[in-house]
Image: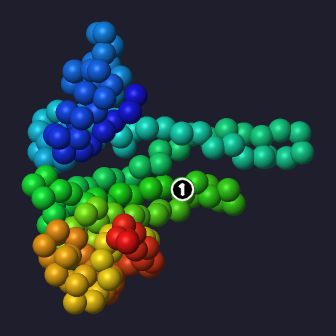
Amino acid sequence: LPIVVAPSKVLRFLDFTLDSKNGLKNGKRIYIGITHRDFEKSPFSKQIRSDVLDIELRRTEIANDIGSEVFPYRPFQFLKNIPVHHCPDAFGFLIGISAPCARSNEDSAFTICYSGDTRPSTNLVRACNDFSRECRQNVSLLLHEATFEHDERGQVEATKKRHSTTLEALNIASQMYVDSVLLTHFSQ
């Protein structure tokens, strides 16, 4: 069952598009929807957070020439919403993913910070650096929007439309403990 964490407008649009009401269609649940704000604070979110973190996948390892073994693993270690500066209810997120390692019994951790649409955000920097200090590891990948070039026109447009320029996104990355940066959401 898909779990959708999104602004209330997106959840309403999803219901409209799917001809459902709060994720229900003809008495059957087709998705679980929760707003970003509720995901962090409501008592209901505790159950959804648990549902996400308890998702179990299976990996298959070839044990020898005659067979293979299937091992369960939980890919999601944590998920944190981070308020960003774009519009009301705009959030980035930090997610920890556990990837099974075929050569050992240990899982390797991979973390992604996704900015979403935003002006340069100290909240994003703080959340990622708090994670890095607490877990003693860098964020693996910062996926940051860089809608505009960092020229005079781009800076004006980025401020007006609450987005980031390429240089602003790279400056945010330089303030974080991050291994890699991928810029996205370029405007023509």
x and y, in percent, of residue 113 in the image: 34, 65
Crowdedness near tag 1: few (<14), some (14–19) or many (≥20) residues, C-alpha within 10 Å: some
Amino acid at pointer 1: Ala
Residue 150 higher or lower than 112, as above or below: below
The quadrant in which residue 70 appears is top right
Give the residue at x 19% y 45%. 7
Give the residue at x 44% y 56%. 97
Q: Which of 105 and 1 is in front in this view?
A: 1
Residue 138 higher or lower than 3, as above or below: below
Residue ranking furthest to the bottom: 152
The quadrant in which residue 3 appears is top left
x and y, in percent, of residue 48 in the image: 27, 36
Quarter containing the N terminus: top left
Q: What element carries label 1?
A: strand
In the displayed structure image, the side of residue 112 where residue 74 appears, left or right = right
Q: Nearer the viewer, residue 160 or 144?
A: 160
Give the residue at x 25% y 63%. 117
Its colouring scheme is rainbow
Residue 130 visible at all: no
Q: Name the residue under label 1.
A: 99
In the displayed structure image, the side of residue 28 where residue 72 appears, left or right = right
x and y, in percent, of residue 68 in the image: 77, 40
Residue 66 visible at all: yes
Give the residue at x 33% y 25%. 18
Tally of marks: 1
In the displayed structure image, the side of residue 110 where residue 22 appears, left or right = left
Residue ranking furthest to the top: 26
Residue 98 higher or lower than 145, as above or below: above
x and y, in percent, of residue 137 in the image: 39, 74
Quarter containing the C terminus: bottom left
